[in-house]
Image (cartoon, grey):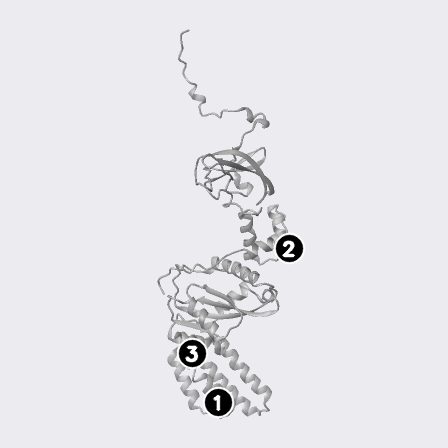
Amino acid sequence: MSSIKIKAPYEFMESKQFKLFDFVPEFSEFRQFDDLSRFGCENIENNLIRLEKRGKIHFENRVAICPSCKSHNAVKNGTYERKLIFLRIGEQICTIQKYKCIKCGKVFYTDLLSLVYSNSNITLPVIECIENLYQIYGAGLHKIRFDLKQQHNIEISHQSIENILLNSNYQFNYDNWTYSGYYLFYSLWVKINGEWNYILALFDVKLNTLVSVKLVESEDSKTIYQFLNESLRNQKKISIGTDLKHEYREAIDKLKVKHHFCKFHVKQAVNKRFKDYFDKNPLSEDEKDILNCLKQDIYKILDAKDLNTAKELRNELINKKYTKNKFTNKILWKFIIPYFKKLTTHLENTNIPSTNNKIENIFQKVFPKHIKRTMKIEQGLLARFMLKLNYWNLNNEKEKNHTSF
């Protein structure tokens, strides 16, 4: 029989070619879904493939590698089912491909570590969602659970949410950070299971973020010195601002870094000393007027616009020769005059802030008072603190390799 050559119908070559399973679902094979993002399981790793069969999600590896002998020569060896919780669709029963190594005979499973932790059924996008909810809103467990149910069709226990927050591991990456040299130091008291503890924090003024945090049991000068020395190793050290605690002063002087007092805390301390003196001593109106004039002269020094003006006001204060007694000697000759340089350091260099407002603002946003008294374990406190701090950094920090300092 003679053969006849027939031209291919090229006008139909781009049309979809239908198969039997397009009409009969029972014959459907695994196929890659066009929009898996709606299942809350976007591609995380190129080697992990998400497919679908009869409405079920199926996972397999693009290249199956034996974990024992590292051979790529493996064949499919059945599947097993596993419950996983995804964003938007909640809990799903997924099929996971099993493999058998031709070389060593080991049976192994599709690697899902890019999607879900071992011994867990909550996928990484859900964990990230829970962490984000806490970072942004600082919500309690009940509120987070309610939001997951309403917005993402996810229903998990309060304990599961608590475990996720406890296991969050946001940490500072110190290796490639270049600090500016201008810092603020602050110590925040916290209660853990009824015992007082302290969060020591170092803030970079130019980077506008915390660069070091440590939870300690006491804030003595030795502990503070060790914290600052470790935090600033191989970094610029120009100035550190603090409030008036003598433990801070001793530690920073030992570190041999320029130390400046927060102007707000200085004014607060001066005002408190005068108020306490007025309350405890019967004074005439003339005596009160003289002391109030002394207080205003001190405030003028603190509010001076430049260093020369501050020095002139200091000299005028000395020459006025206020009545000498135990109170005036203590506030003038044991505080204002000997620590004049620490009170006016910000006038020497405009990069040095006059107050600690920036670091205190972080603590007010990250760890307000209604939270910091309720912690029961150290891990819970630090995990929550670092999560909230991470959100602050994403919104406020500048480039860490900035070179214009």
Instruction: Identify the residue shown where x is 55% and y is 24%.
Output: 20
Q: x, y percentage for residue 273?
A: 54, 83
Label 1 and label 3: CA atoms lie apart by 19 Å
The mark found on residue 142 in the picture is 2
Instruction: Identify the residue shown where x is 49% and y is 77%.
Output: 245
Residue 354 visible, this orientation: no
- Disc 2 marks a residue whose amino acid type is His
Q: x, y percentage for residue 157?
A: 64, 51
Dot 1 and dot 3 residues touching (CB under 8 Å): no
Q: Secondary structure at mark 3?
A: helix
The residue closer to the viewer here, 197 or 147, is 197
Note whether 50 is above or below 272 in the view shown: above
The mark found on residue 205 in the picture is none
Q: Residues within 10 Å of mark 3 (few under 14, many from 20)?
A: some
Instruction: Identify the residue shown where x is 50% and y is 79%.
Output: 267
The mark found on residue 342 in the picture is 3
Between circles 1 and 2, the one closer to the viewer is 2
Q: Earlier in the sequence, mark 1 or mark 2?
A: 2
The residue closer to the viewer here, 20 or 329, is 20
The residue pinned by badge 1 equals: 329
Dot 1 and dot 2 residues touching (CB under 8 Å): no
- Disc 1 marks a residue whose amino acid type is Asn
Dot 3 and dot 2 residues touching (CB under 8 Å): no
Note whether 389 is above or below 350 in the view shown: above
Q: Earlier in the sequence, mark 1 or mark 3?
A: 1
Q: Residues within 10 Å of mark 1 (few under 14, many from 20)?
A: some
Between circles 3 and 2, the one closer to the viewer is 2
Q: x, y percentage for residue 111?
A: 50, 42
Q: Earlier in the sequence, mark 3 or mark 2?
A: 2
Residue 388 visible, this orientation: yes
Label 1 and label 2: CA atoms lie apart by 57 Å
The quadrant of the picture occupied by the N terminus is top left
